[in-house]
């Protein structure tokens, strides 16, 4: 739901241009096509704007943001959903609060003025990002949900702070610099990002579970970061032993997941479901269908490759739940033909065209008249579903088993996930001294990407490379991890913690989630990332998350009654689009993009890459002695090379403030 933007100046008397705020909303019209609003606090040097996707309270005037409190002390611009808001609103009303809308957003104003920020955040359940200005304390709070489902960026200018839901929203402000940083470029080429960072110089993200507090004192903005939540697994020795009663955890997971699903069915518009052939989305659809009196609309992506297509199981699940099933069948050319447009929305590079497939699917959802779907993201993070987690469990978490047995399990894992070697699993072991020191080992989930460093670093323009001479990407990531939540934890918990802090927020919820969903005005609700469910999942003993060679064991058992038997028994299959090298037509599409964005002229104009090294990567990719795993890795690197060039085209070479101005004019959005 929605997109937000705002400006907070150092000096109260510095004027804020109202049309600039409107332009910032207009450039993210896709996030909120149902209306816009803006408000400037006179003589306070602060202004917010908002683009609205109406899901709760469809009255466009009544629920129009930004919201002001009755005494105009507080101003709010909010993106996302607060679940359980009806109960909270009723409780506050009984205590004397008077609500002017039926919007879930308004609860923040009443909670904050009664209880303060810390108590307010404990009450908020869902996916959200908001800016809240308190005139009394002359303070702006930028708040992001616990897992980072909703995005929120900020940067400093000579005049103050600019924030927004997307990078292009910041770039629409004339004072915001638009340039890659050397470190940001490096991390775009290796996929894994430093938490809180972006590709661009001086542009930051509010990290999940955190608040950026910006207080103005004597004409100067002072910026602090506050943590209000983190992924907190128990101490390794506090878990019950192998004799634990599994039933307790199976029942607990079922109860918490059902509660999360039912909360996410709250909307004043229809709610559909994404449906792959995996346990996660099948569980969501099964519970949603049983919770409602009507047929649930289910949307499935199909690929023209039997190795990657999951539609047969999805179809079986849809029939079992009597869902209204919509399958979008994608061919090779569909993906790279929409690569450039997808990256305008993701604002970061993508290693696999699954991001494009998700973009095209959200387009179909929008055309079907749906604004909201529930999704299965987060299940693998909570219940250790990825192959990398099993690998770390076998290597580091099963000390009581003979080494030969652990190695046999690992060998079977590698064999069954051969398709994903070079992407989801590293081609060969990679060790980071910094992560070894911080985590105890280098988690398998980041090894495929950190191991790309040897290919990626030479690709960088020689002048920028000089800035990276002593830079260690593993160290940069390790420095952001909170040792408090790693010390004394089980190895599997540590591996999951690192994934949640890096790949979940930086990939799954970005180019696999919000950015490609909201690109077509469609809100995705990942029920597994309900923090009540997550906090319970963290207490499930590691040997019930991965039991023997079976991942997500406790979830499988909790959902056994509604899953197709084939799926219940099947090993986790990573959901991704077929890599480019697997299809001649797809590879031709890559070559066409390379002619435009990776030509010698294009590379030299952007000044980001070294053209000779770019050519060397393509030569190696087509070499007769390249292995399939190396081709998978090189496919990813080529996608990243294309990606940084496309991002340069979209956000550096293009005059974004002028683009935003023109968009506002087209929409008739004026101050």
Image: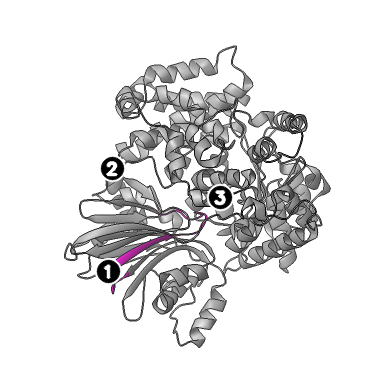
Q: CA distance from mark 1 to mark 3?
A: 40 Å
Given the current orientation, which residue lies at the most extreme left position? 13
Q: Could you tell me which secondary element the residue under label 2 belongs to? A: loop
At a point 65% along the width and 60% down the height, the residue shown is 536
| Magenta-highlighted residues | 134-152
| Mark 2 surroundings within 10 Å by alpha-carbon count, few (fewer than 14), some (14 through 19), many (20 or more) | some
Q: Does residue 202 appear in the picture of this structure?
A: yes
Identify the coloring.
one colour
The residue pinned by badge 3 equals 362
Q: Which mark is residue 138?
A: 1
**Magenta: predominant secondary structure element?**
loop
Residue 348 visible somewhere in the drawing? no
Within 10 angstroms of label 3, few (less than 14), some, or many (20 or more) residues? Answer: many
Label 1 residue SS: loop
The mark that comes first in sequence, 2 or 3, is: 3
Position of 461 with respect to 89 (left or right) is left
The image shows residue 173, relative to residue 90, as above or below, that is above
Relative vertical location of residue 291 with respect to residue 166 in this rendering, above or below: below
Q: Label 2 vs label 1: CA separation? A: 33 Å
Mark 2 or mark 1: name the one nearer the start of the chain. 1
Q: Among all residues in the image, which is located at the extreme top? A: 624
State the residue at coordinates (49%, 32%): 433
Q: What x and y, as percent, mark residue 177?
A: 27, 44
Point 49% across, 23% down: residue: 591
Q: Nearer the viewer, mark 2 or mark 1?
A: 1
Q: Quadrant of residue 140?
A: bottom left
Question: On the image, numbered disc 2 is attached to which residue?
Answer: 655
* Residue at mark 2 to residue at mark 3: CA–CA distance: 28 Å
Q: Nearer the viewer, residue 641 or 155?
A: 155
């Amino acid at each position: 739901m929605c997109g937000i933007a705002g400006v907070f100046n150092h000096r109260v008397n510095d004027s804020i241009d109202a049309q600039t705020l409107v332009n910032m909303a207009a450039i993210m019209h896709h996030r909120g096509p149902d209306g816009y609003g803006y408000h400037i606090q006179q003589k306070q040097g602060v202004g917010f704007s908002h683009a609205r996707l109406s899901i709760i309270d469809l009255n466009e005037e009544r629920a129009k943001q930004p919201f002001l409190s009755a005494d105009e002390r507080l101003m709010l611009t909010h993106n996302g959903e607060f679940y359980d808001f009806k109960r909270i609103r009723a409780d506050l009303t009984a205590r004397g609060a008077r609500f002017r809308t039926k919007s879930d957003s308004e609860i923040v104003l009443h909670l904050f003025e009664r209880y303060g920020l810390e108590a307010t955040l404990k009450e908020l359940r869902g996916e959200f990002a908001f800016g809240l200005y308190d005139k009394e304390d002359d303070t702006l709070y930028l708040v992001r949900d616990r897992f980072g489902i909703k995005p929120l960026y900020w940067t400093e200018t000579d005049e103050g702070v600019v924030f927004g839901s997307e990078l292009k929203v910041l770039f629409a402000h004339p004072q915001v610099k638009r340039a890659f940083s050397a470190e940001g470029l490096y991390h775009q080429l290796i996929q894994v990002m430093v938490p809180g960072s972006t590709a661009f110089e001086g542009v930051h993200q509010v990290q999940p579970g955190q608040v950026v507090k910006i207080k103005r004192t004597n004409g100067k903005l002072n910026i602090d970061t506050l943590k209000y939540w983190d992924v907190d697994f128990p101490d390794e020795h506090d878990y019950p032993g192998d004799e634990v009663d599994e039933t307790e955890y199976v029942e607990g997971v079922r109860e918490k997941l059902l509660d999360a699903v039912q909360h996410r069915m709250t909307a004043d518009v229809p709610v559909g479901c994404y449906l792959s052939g995996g346990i996660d989305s099948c569980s969501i659809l099964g519970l949603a269908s049983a919770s409602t009196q009507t047929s649930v609309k289910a949307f499935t992506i199909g690929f023209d490759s039997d190795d990657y297509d999951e539609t047969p199981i999805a179809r079986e699940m849809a029939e079992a739940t009597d869902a209204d099933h919509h399958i979008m069948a994608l061919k090779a050319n569909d993906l790279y033909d929409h690569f450039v447009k997808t990256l305008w929305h993701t604002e970061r590079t993508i290693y696999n065209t699954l991001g494009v497939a998700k973009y095209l699917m959200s387009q179909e959802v929008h055309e079907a008249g749906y604004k909201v779907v529930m999704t299965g993201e987060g299940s693998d993070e909570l219940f250790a579903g990825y192959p990398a987690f099993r690998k770390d469990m076998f290597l580091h978490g099963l000390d009581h088993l003979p080494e030969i047995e652990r190695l046999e399990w690992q060998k079977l894992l590698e064999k069954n996930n051969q398709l994903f070697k070079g992407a989801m699993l590293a081609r060969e072991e990679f060790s980071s001294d910094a992560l070894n020191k911080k985590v105890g080992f280098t988690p398998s989930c980041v090894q495929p990407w950190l191991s790309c460093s040897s290919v990626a670093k030479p690709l960088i323009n020689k002048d920028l490379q000089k800035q990276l001479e002593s830079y260690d990407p593993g160290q940069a990531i390790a420095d952001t991890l909170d040792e408090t939540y790693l010390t004394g934890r089980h190895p599997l918990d540590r591996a999951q913690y690192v994934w949640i802090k890096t790949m979940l927020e930086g990939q799954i919820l970005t180019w696999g989630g919000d950015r490609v969903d909201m690109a077509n005005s469609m809100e995705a609700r990942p029920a597994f990332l309900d923090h009540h469910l997550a906090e319970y999942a963290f207490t499930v003993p590691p040997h019930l998350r991965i039991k023997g060679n079976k991942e997500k064991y406790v979830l499988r058992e909790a959902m056994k009654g509604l899953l197709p038997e084939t799926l219940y028994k099947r090993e986790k299959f990573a959901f991704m689009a077929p890599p480019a090298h697997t299809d001649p037509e797809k590879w031709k599409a890559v070559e066409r993009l390379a002619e435009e964005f990776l030509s010698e002229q294009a590379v030299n104009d952007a000044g980001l890459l070294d053209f000779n090294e770019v050519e060397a990567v393509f030569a190696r990719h087509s070499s007769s002695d390249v292995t399939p795993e190396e081709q998978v890795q090189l496919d990813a690197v080529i996608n990243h090379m294309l990606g940084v060039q496309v991002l340069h085209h979209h956000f550096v070479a293009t005059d974004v403030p002028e683009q935003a101005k023109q968009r506002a004019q087209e929409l008739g959005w004026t101050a």
